[in-house]
Amino acid sequence: VQLQASGGGLVQPGGSLTLSCAASGFTFSSYFMTWVRQIHGKDPEWVAAIDESGGIANYEESVKGRFTISRDNTRNILYLKMNNLKIEDTAMYYCATEINDSTYRGQGTLVTVSS
């Protein structure tokens, strides 16, 4: 299982970014996918999740209405569209999935929101 996130960067408050996660080594379209973020020195925090078909999505309360999770099962890519970014969104963002009771989390991408 390989998960590679990309798309992070430096953005001003109120700005937007779209993260991507390229998945391989498993049948992507058969698994629930999530985005997780981790602020340096703190525990990881679940951000958003999407079901296998992309029809059902759930969000952590602080990102509702600002973030949108989506997936392209033809290309095995997971997305996170982030709008109206806030300073407190600054974190390393990872995509993750659970397969046979094992959690896989790939390399993350750093999002820095700063003026």
Image (cartoon, rainbow, N blue to C red):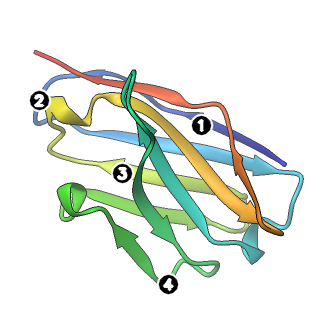
Q: Residue at x 84, y 49 (%)?
A: 1
Image quadrant where one finds the C terminus: top left
| Vertical side of 108 occupied by 112: above or below | above
The image quadrant of residue 32 is: bottom right
User: Residues under labels 4 and 3: Cα distance?
Assistant: 16 Å
Residue 26 placement (x, y as % from top left): 87, 60
The image quadrant of residue 78 is: bottom right
- Which label's residue is closer to the chain start, 4 or 3? 4
| Near-viewer residue (46 or 78) | 46
Local crowd at mark 2 within 10 Å, few (<14), some, or many (≥20)?
A: some
User: Residues under labels 4 and 2: Cα distance?
Assistant: 30 Å
Residue 77 placement (x, y as % from top left): 65, 54
- Which label's residue is closer to the chain start, 1 or 2? 1
**SS for callout 2:** loop
Local crowd at mark 1 within 10 Å, few (<14), some, or many (≥20)?
A: many
Give the residue pinned by disc 4.
Answer: 55
| Vertical side of 63 occupied by 7: above or below | above
**Amino acid type at image mark 4:** Gly
| Vertical side of 43 occupied by 47: above or below | below
**For this view, does 72 lie left or right of residue 3?**
left
**Amino acid type at image mark 1:** Ala
Give the residue pinned by disc 1.
Answer: 5
**Amino acid type at image mark 2:** Pro
User: Residues under labels 1 and 4: Cα distance?
Assistant: 22 Å
**SS for callout 1:** strand
Give the residue pinned by disc 3.
Answer: 81
Residue 45 placement (x, y as % from top left): 40, 47
